[in-house]
Image: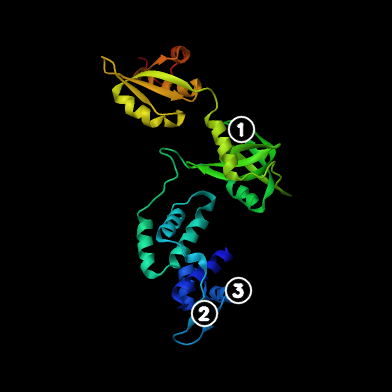
Amino acid sequence: MRSDRLLATLLLLQTHGRLPAPEIARRLEVSTRTVQRDVEALSSAGVPVYCERGRRGGVALLEGYRTDVTGMTDDEVRALVALGASADGALGPALASASRKLLAALPEARRDDVDRARRRLLVEHQGWRRAPEDLPALPALDAALVADERVRMQYATGDSPRATWRTVDPYGLVSKAGTWYLVAAHRGQPKMYRVSRVRAVASTGTPARRPDERGLAEVWGELRHRLETAGEEVEVRLLVDPDWAATLRRVHLAQLAGPWRSEGAEPDGRERLVAPFRSVLAARAALLGYGETVEVLAPAELRAEMAAAAARVVAMYTRSRLPEGSPPD
């Protein structure tokens, strides 16, 4: 964006006092003619910038003129540059470009230190063994947010192949652990929508009419709390094969409402664990795949559900035919 480039030009001149136009063009990845137009724009806006001709000339800023933008500490600059280098999603290219311009505007001594720190910090937004989401609707939703417009979108709930149209008033976009959500009001009620499930977006051209004046962070916090506390928390007592105990603790933290507790080991070596799952359904979904390596002791309701689910799986495989070409046992 031109405003970003004008700011970057001003920062460069504030840092160096005078720079040849081709050098500014090189650092900002634009043409020399673009630099000349930007200098004219800055001058028209009241910034005391001018051009000097000759071998030692260039673009200069009146001595003593300062702007508060570069009053940042090295830690603040490193944080911003690292954010830009690790950005993903709709804002990735813009943040990366802004971080390069900020780095270019620093004095040589500070630039080397910040660049070295940037190259030693990486923020990975994607979870382990998770493919990146397909987000064709993200740019259109971001454009609607910039315009503060009401949005019509075609949305598929859950894994349903059928998508329906609905009109929403957006609060904003949230990226959580590599997954993007649109926070918007539908019929006056704030809700969250997974962006990967948005099939199409249509502009309405009308201003968004949110039911209240709350900001995105406050509404998102309420929706997140509602989701995380959905259902009744259940304390599950388990016997776990010692070879699987560490994996169980590590993999299923997201389904827990609190930390695991160990109550020692049984004579056969199995570890006795207590885990506060968010619901019986979450516990069953998390534990069933461990087969005989995990035994549920309590509550009785969950133990019964585990047994019934295991019986249904056995029955399904017992009655089903072998695929053609498969050898018999």
Label 3 or label 1, whichever comes before in sequence order: 3
What is the CA distance from the residue labelled 1 to the residue labelled 2?
59 Å
On the image, which quarter does residue 193 sit in? top right
Q: Residue furthest right?
A: 206
Q: Does residue 13 appear in this view?
A: yes
Q: Which residue is mark 2?
A: 62
> Foreground residue, 97 or 81?
81
What is the CA distance from the residue labelled 3 to the residue labelled 1?
49 Å
- Residue 211 lies, with reference to residue 159, above or below; the image says below
- Image marks 3 and 1: residues in contact by CB distance under 8 Å: no
Q: Which mark is residue 157?
A: 1
**Residue 234 locus on image (x, y percent):** 47, 21
Q: Badge 1, how many Cα within 10 Å: few under 14, some, many 20+?
A: some
- Which residue appears at 38% of the width and 26% of the height? 260
> Mark 1 falls on what kind of element?
loop
**Residue 156 locus on image (x, y percent):** 62, 34
What is the CA distance from the residue labelled 2 to the residue labelled 3?
16 Å
> Foreground residue, 49 or 135?
49
> Mark 2 falls on what kind of element?
loop
Tell me the kind of residue under disc 1.
Thr
Tell me the kind of residue under disc 3.
Ala
- Residue 20 lies, with reference to residue 2, above or below; the image says below
Mark 3 against mark 1, which lies toward the viewer? 3
- Image marks 1 and 2: residues in contact by CB distance under 8 Å: no
Q: Which mark is residue 41?
A: 3
